[in-house]
Image (cartoon, helix red, strand yellow):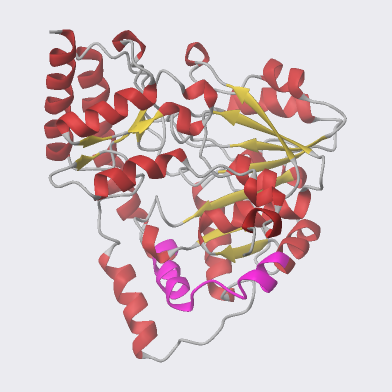
Amino acid sequence: MIDYNKILSNKILQVKPSGIRKFFDIAAEMEGVISLGVGEPDFDTPYSVRQAGIKSLEEGKTWYTANAGLAPLREGIARYLQRRFDGLTYDPSDEILVTVGGSEAIDIAIRTLVDPGDEVIIPEPSFVCYTPIVQLAGGVPVPIPTREENEFRLTAQELKDALTERTKLLVLPFPNNPTGAVMERRHLEEIAQVLRGTDVMVLSDEIYAELTYGGLKHTPFAAIEGMWERTITVNGFSKAFAMTGWRLGYACCPAPILAQMKKAHQFAIMCAPTVSQYAALEAINNCDDSIEEMKEEYDSRRRYIVDAFNKLGLPCFTPKGAFYVFPCIRSTGMSSAQFCEELLYSKKIAVVPGDAFGESGEGFIRVSYSYSLSHLKKAIKRIGEFLEERQG
């Protein structure tokens, strides 16, 4: 009989499954659950984008594209970044790679840069994929807990204290999932000052770049003076254009780095889905108005849910980006996991424990407001009932 623990890679064995999945799996087996757990827009993909995908199929455009992606799409991405983000400039011929979602871009960026023993600094709480991918590459994750009193930002001093001679990469996950925190230009300039004079590269995950609120505009880290040459910018179509299921993202960086990333992409993937690329071409060229319409609706939901949690007695940091809130549940006396599990079983509300995003997330829960206002109001009502019953 085969002993699978002997034949499986030690690197895969040491990686823990995402804690998010547990609650999704339980909720999937229950009827009448209201989920606030999935980070997915509730909007349909814009009509013209869907039609562009359909048209490409009807015209028989179902062959492989170039490994790097359709040339017109890469050109469109270059124009989009320059138009929307501080004139950020990349050459579509050798500095832009179209990937299967932003997740693939993160994976191949880390695999391209990280050798066994290299340290990767990861501000937490943050998206669940960074640490496991670093581990799979043989690297050493170095988490930096961010704090609510600093609005969950990474500070220059925290970064400086974490740097060692083995530091290879800094992950900048802003706007942030799960906290909704952002790094404004002045904060990024402080981070840049720490990095000057080092060889530390930066993976800037900017998948929520279009979702900032209160008149705040996202600043790409590569737009900070002297940082372009050390930054891999990751973005995609899932959040801004409501295209999660189309699975399309991209990475932008200096040509010498991109050429090596393309190897991993070529041998593992070949190219991103052709139909998705034609749909994305329409999105990036003609759907700026759709971005603004969806963002306006998210902002309305954001203001409602922050106020609602504060009124329930669960202090809630006001996020300035993405579409999540991160209320503190310490006053209940429960752990994050206990709170989420009891809420799910007693009131059929699915949210995510904060510690799924790193140990510093303990004492918080992640709640997505990428759902309709009526959906949110029903959920808040049940959460209020849950808290009252616990107190009574």
In which quarter of the view is residue 307 placed?
top left
User: Was residue 277 drawn as part of the magenta stretch in this picture?
Assistant: yes
Residue 53: in magenta span = no
Name the outermost residue toward the bottom.
60
Q: Name the residue at 74% across, 22% down.
A: 162
Q: What residue occupies the far front of the structure in this picture?
A: 1
Quadrant location, the C terminus: top left
Position of 163 compared to 46: left or right?
right
Q: Position of residue 172 (x, y in %)?
A: 61, 36
> Is any atom of residue 253 visible in this view?
no
Residue 220 position in % (x across, y down): 59, 40
Q: In this picture, is 306 found above or below 377?
A: above
> Considering the image in quadrants, where does the N terminus appear?
bottom right
Quadrant position of residue 97 = bottom right
Residue at (38%, 91%) from the top-left corner?
59
Q: Is residue 306 above or below residue 119?
A: above
Q: In the drawing, does residue 386 fall left or right of residue 238?
A: left
The residue that appears at 50% across and 37% down in the rendered structure is 218
Left or right: 212, with 268 as reference point: left
Q: Is residue 41 visible?
A: yes
- Check the image and report above or below for 102 versus 179: below
The magenta span reads 264-284
Residue 305 locus on image (x, y percent): 24, 26
